[in-house]
Amino acid sequence: MTTITLPPAPRAVPLLTCQPGAVRECGGDLLAASAQIDDLGTFVAGDARIDDWTGRGSARYHETIAPIGRQADAMSLALRSVATRVDAHADELQRLLDRRTDLEERRSYLTGEVVRLRGEVTSATEDDAAALQAECDRVRREVEVYEADVTAWSSDIAAEETAMVQAFQRVQEAEAVERIYGGVADPADGALATKPGSGASPAEVNAWWDSLTPGQQQAIIAAAPGAIGNLDGIPAGARDAANTVALDRDLADWTHTESLGELTDDERTWLENARAADEARRNIADRVDPVTGEPIETQIYLYDPAAFDGDGAIAISAGNLDTADNVSVVVPGLGTEGESAGYQADRAATLYESSRYLDPDASNASMFWIGYDAPDNAPWDEGFDGAGVVSEQMATAGGERLADTIDGLRASRDGDPAHLTAIGHSYGSTTTGHAAHDQGIEVDEIVFVGSPGVGGDTNDAGDTGIDPEHVWAGANSRDPVADLGNHGWVHGETVLGAGLGDDPAEDDFGANRFEAESETRGGAFSFGDHSKYFDHDTESLFNISQIVNGNYDAVEHADHVYDPWYDGVQDPEYDRNPTSPATR
Amino acid sequence: MEVVPLSVGVASQRWDDQHLDLDAAAGQISGAGSDGFTSAVSGAASRFLTQWQRHAEALGTDSEARADGLRIVIRDYVTSDEAAGVDLFLLSTYVAEQR
Amino acid sequence: MLAGWLSTVLVLGACGSGDDDVVDSVALEQQRDRARASAKALVTGAVDALGGRASQTTGRVEGCESASEDEVRTFRYTATGRVDAGAAATRPYLDGLVPVMEAAGFADPTPGSRPGGSTLEGTSGDLTATLSELPGQGDYVLLSVEGPCLEVPEEDRRDWQRRTDPESYL
């Protein structure tokens, strides 16, 4: 009788209980706090000095504050080092969890193999013995490799835990902080000294950033997030890291001051904008990619809660702007300010979801851009009397800023350039029109939706500087704002001294008009229909997404608006039954 | 007595701002949370966060002391017989802490 | 100057719909609870059927129809999840998930397609469950359970827009 040696059962994978996301948030909080402490050091070296005060009192004061500055500088470096280590720890924990998942799957497979072989052995004949032993030996070898991998995995956990504990303990006490970091130069200082001046192009800024070491880049993000967070030419990932530090720091500062009842009016306004930015990033991160099922990546590309007299400037992307195949920038219109960020984030997210759903093989990033001072007086908020005067002035200024943003997006990317689409909605289409006509923007597609006019000097699609084949217009027939553009031979600016330019959906303009009706459209003009262009399962979102993806053949074209001399403005879409194409 | 310029009052307010900001940073550190770490690390993390909350608070207290010190300088000056100048009224508004 | 132009289109309502369909926000809360319970049953069944593991088992309130430039009129709850198939699972994964759908109360699930993949869709009351398989993207199945769009009272809109729901339903 032949004896068959069975392979051993593989041992269970030990539990690994941790939350990398929570650890990463802990690191982010520590980094934001380090930026705050760094600010004290900067303050002591600068604004705390009172140069026009002389005498013994002044001398004593300046002697007293110097050690505080030194201590703050050392503490910020120490806390930054721990924050960076905590962030790396979060990454490592995630890798260890992934490895554990793989090990569990291997164990499950091997356990099944062992059970199978045990069963086969009980019913095996002498003739089967050799083959069965060979099979058992194969599984045994696999179990041995598995066991070694479990041991290595456990060792790696222990090593990582030890390193993290040591990083905490190394600078736990103030004496250790002074001993290790006292008088040490901040790597951010030297790097910032070489930063190009305010007139530098995005390409020059990008070249400077690329010339820095990773350590210098990380130091700037932590110590001086405001220096790069909104600087065109800096890659979106670095801008996001810097703006995250700034946003977290601002939220902590102003919330604390609010709790003491000491917020100034300005700070209250800024806090509202900061909270809107926080809501916006959470709105996006809370949703899932329709292809992977994983949370959508967010990037805070622009964060300045005090911009435009407190209206605020915020731009946040759904998706990675540095690497996405297709990038779109949504420019909102009337009544948009920082506090609108939460809602605008939903629009960026629906566009991201739709674009991904319709082309799962392409990566996407969709960014809402509240980067200009839009008119506050929206007619749907204030009625027509309150709406008052809306001119092109803000669109002209906004167009310059948009052009800078597009330049920055282009210059900061490595590798293949993105297929880039600028989407102007409402007054944002006037702004986009000005950016294209006045500044020239390096985009692949321009989309105007719900446009009240694309600027008085843009008479046809060719005036945008983009091939008219790539200029698009969407207009819901019930949208009253889309009906405000110039039609036919009537040009408001010249005839009546009013108007925001031509209707891009009209035949004379020469853009591609796409279907943009909504199944929930009203029976007559309705401001609700001015706001549905980015809602899921609408013709508009479907077509915008196909344009963003460069899938031109899939775009459903619509007949243009026209204005015969013998009659009023005609919209062929008015009587067409709307559809509801799937976008999710 | 040495003249105390208005800029001393401005600096005292800035030190108060630093105090507020550092208290906020201390709160941020203590609220960072150690729950996500493994049990082998969470103790060290918790201890670090507690200790650093104190470090940040101490820096805030130092900042407040600088603001208070400057306010004493201002009060001594504006109540002295030697005080003079057009900024005296404005300077006196910095005697009390306010935002 | 746009004011003169705006006065020419005065025949407008503030919103396309009346208040006839306004429901209490409680209905949306109930939709959330039912969607999460169904998603839990489906994910648990799919993990068993595919020998796999579940992840991203969360849900959220999503806006359906915009009312104005910064406001949404109707909302629905969507619970989503992902189940990575085990090594022994065979494609098409969705074929083996018909009983799972039925056991979770989604009778007669219907096969369909989506860009780059296929779907299995079923309804249970007012809830719709969709399972997706995208062979070109990886060895997993995506799941979503959602209810119909509901109009909430105007004063509750901002709260629903801001609401997040990061807890897993498992």
Image (cartoon, coloured by chain):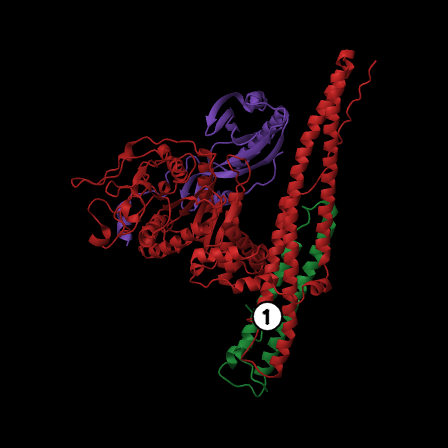
Between residues C151 and A173, which one lies in front from this camera angle?
Answer: A173
Left or right of C128? Residue A87 is: right
Where on the picture, by quarter, is residue A438? Answer: bottom left
State the SS at label 1.
Answer: helix
Position of the C terminus of chain C, as image quadrant, is top right
Among all residues in the image, which is located at the extreme left?
Answer: A566
Left or right of B5? Residue A358 is: left
Above or below residue A516? Residue C94 is above
The residue identified by callout 1 is: A44
Q: Amino acid at mark 1?
A: Val
The chain letter under disc 1 is A
Between residues A320 and A325, which one lies in front from this camera angle?
Answer: A325
Percent across and percent down for residue A577 are 32, 30
Percent across and percent down for residue A319 are 49, 43
Residue drawn at x 52%, y 81% is B88
User: Callout 1 environment at 10 Å: few (<14), some (14 to 19), or many (20+)?
Assistant: many
Percent across and percent down for residue A533 are 38, 40
Above or below residue A9? Residue A506 is below
Image chain in purple: C
Left or right of A165? Residue A438 is: left
Between residues A21 and A171, which one lies in front from this camera angle?
Answer: A171
Residue drawn at x 54%, y 23% is C92
Image chain in red: A
Percent across and percent down for residue A388 are 31, 55
Image chain in green: B
Residue A119 visible here: no
Where on the picture, by quarter, is residue A138? Answer: top right
Position of the N terminus of chain C, as image quadrant, is bottom left
